[in-house]
Image (spheres, rainbow, N blue to C red):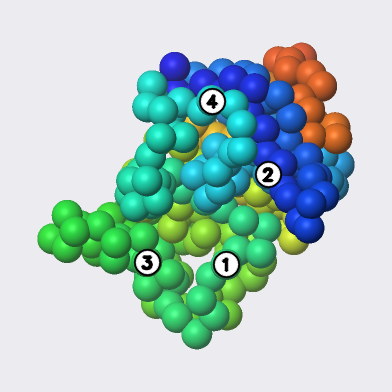
Amino acid sequence: MLIEAKRLAKIYANEGIETPALLDATFQIDQGEFVSIMGPSGSGKSTLMHILGLLDRSTGGEYRLEGRDVVSLSDDELARLRNEEIGFVFQAFNLLPRTSVFENVELPLLYDRNSAENTKERVMAALKSVNMEHRASFFSSQLSGGEKQRVAIARALVNNPKIIFADEPTGNLDSKSGLQVMRIFQKLSEEGKTIILVTHETFTAEHAKRILRMMDGRIVSDESVANRRFADQENMLLK
């Protein structure tokens, strides 16, 4: 079992007022699954992703990652685990604008003491996996939105993480670029990566194999996708 959550909760307290953002979240995710977390704004999906991705701590419940009790880890231990096991892709790309594509993808390796000898090979392999190796010397500011997101995926992959978290990764993209990104995620899933995708769009969520639907901080359903969408087929329809 890769991820095991039991009664996860996140409650924000401000001047004596408590605001629940996540309540009683219980589920499991196996290695290699492609799961969408879906819900409207304010449903708690990003809060859940931040906790699962070790960017934030829960205020209640249990969270085990590969059997390890995450709640008991120190901040330094969480940071090390996050850098070694997890990659992130965000809607806004979060690339450094006047820095080359190569240097953007290289960034996570700067925190890895064991990466010095094969940095170039790892960066170029990550770029090749998203068909962006020919843009390695370009500034990220010279790229289209779809190209920026593919570089962001390469950066998430460069440390060879077990889990990729993607927060609204197609939100700033046109339909064709969005399908290219979903095709990459589906390919990574087929290769054994665990993909956890956060979205408010049904169309995007249905590219996964399973959907956790959220409302008002709670998981209201957990179901396999009956009629899964495949980006390769949909891309053909756009041509």
Is residue 128 toward the left or the right of residue 194 in the image?
left
The answer to whether the residues at label 4 and label 1 have Cβ atoms under 8 Å apart is no
Outermost residue toward the front in this view? 16
Is residue 66 toward the left or the right of residue 169 in the image?
left
| Labels 2 and 4: the sequence-earlier one | 2
Q: Name the residue at 41% across, 35% down.
A: 72
Q: Amino acid at mark 2?
A: Thr
Q: Is residue 15 above or below residue 78?
A: below
Residue 200 in sight from this viewpoint: no
Q: Which residue is mark 1?
A: 94
Residue 47, numbered circle: 2
Mark 4 nearby-residue class (10 Å; few <14, some 14–19, many ≥20) = some
Nearer the camera: disc 4 or disc 1:
4
Outermost residue toward the left in this view? 117
Residue 138 in sight from this viewpoint: yes
Mark 4 lies on a secondary structure that is: strand
Real-space CA distance between mark 1 and mark 2, rounded to the nearest whole angstrom = 19 Å
Q: Is residue 16 above or below residue 28?
A: below
Relative image position of residue 27 (x, y in whole percent): 62, 19
| Labels 3 and 4: the sequence-earlier one | 4
| Labels 4 and 1: the sequence-earlier one | 4
Nearer the camera: disc 3 or disc 4:
4
| Labels 3 and 1: the sequence-earlier one | 1
Observer-nearest of 144 and 85: 85
Nearer the camera: disc 2 or disc 3:
2
Q: Amino acid at mark 3?
A: Leu
Mark 1 lies on a secondary structure that is: loop
Q: Is residue 48 above or below residue 4?
A: below
Q: Which residue is mark 3?
A: 107
| Labels 2 and 3: the sequence-earlier one | 2
Q: Which residue is mark 4?
A: 62
Q: Name the residue at 29% across, 66% down.
A: 110
